Image (spheres, rainbow, N blue to C red):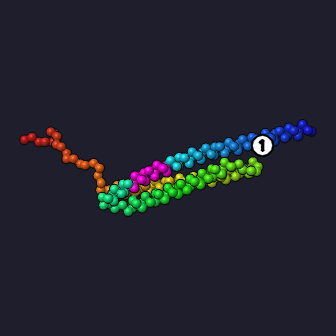
Amino acid sequence: MKDTRAEIKEVREKMASSTEKRNETMKKRADNVFDKTTSRMEATIEREEIIMAKITARIEKIKMAGGKTASAEKLVAEAKTDFVAARVALDSLKALVDTGNVGVPGTASTSIMVMNDILAKMKAAGKEAEKDIRLGHQSLMKAVGVLRGVSELRNATSTEKIKTNAEVKIY
């Protein structure tokens, strides 16, 4: 009888340790995926902000030349607010990832339920950030399109066409 109880106790301990290992593996995977996602989104936002600075500089040049840039400025402002919203969503995503790192007390089933809830919130925050990044990018593209039609500045100068021998008529 004592041997049977000892065997049952050993089996339970093995099951508990395998469950803990599975939970740790799940946490590591989630952390890895969301760390890569957040770093990719941060890099995208930084690139878009660099582009936004270039567009802003172009707007200033066109203003100095006397062009109308009100609609382009409005689109750049919209893009800026979209990127701020994306940064806020990324910060909430990072907070959720940090929350997922904390050990959850309780049984294995409640810890899995809590992890699934955290993962669902992480996905929602990631989608929100991605949506804001896309909206900001679209606003910047529209601003560039508006500036193309408004710009009076020309970088290249046109030269007169030189007549070749084939074009010159000899009488």
Q: Whole-percent x and y of residue 17?
A: 76, 41
Q: Residues within 10 Å of mark 1 (few under 14, many from 20)?
A: some
Q: Main secondary structure of the magenta part?
A: helix
Stretch of the chain drawn in magenta: 44-56
Residue positioned most to the right? 1
Which quarter of the rendering shows the C terminus?
top left
Horizontal side of 140 relative to 164 (left or right) equals: right
Q: Which residue is mark 1?
A: 16
Q: Whole-percent x and y of residue 140?
A: 43, 55
Q: Tell which of 103 and 131 is nearer to you.
A: 103
At horizontal 83% and vertical 38% (from top left) the residue drawn is 10
Q: Please identify the quarter of the rendering in which residue 129 is found.
A: bottom right
Q: Please identify the quarter of the rendering in which residue 2 is found.
A: top right
Horizontal side of 98 relative to 164 (left or right) equals: right
At horizontal 37% and vertical 57% (from top left) the residue drawn is 59
Q: Secondary structure at mark 1?
A: helix
Q: Whole-percent x and y of residue 29?
A: 64, 43
Is any atom of residue 115 visible in this view? yes
At horizontal 43% and vertical 53% (from top left) the residue drawn is 52
Q: Is residue 70 magenta?
A: no
Q: Name which residue type carries label 1.
A: Ala
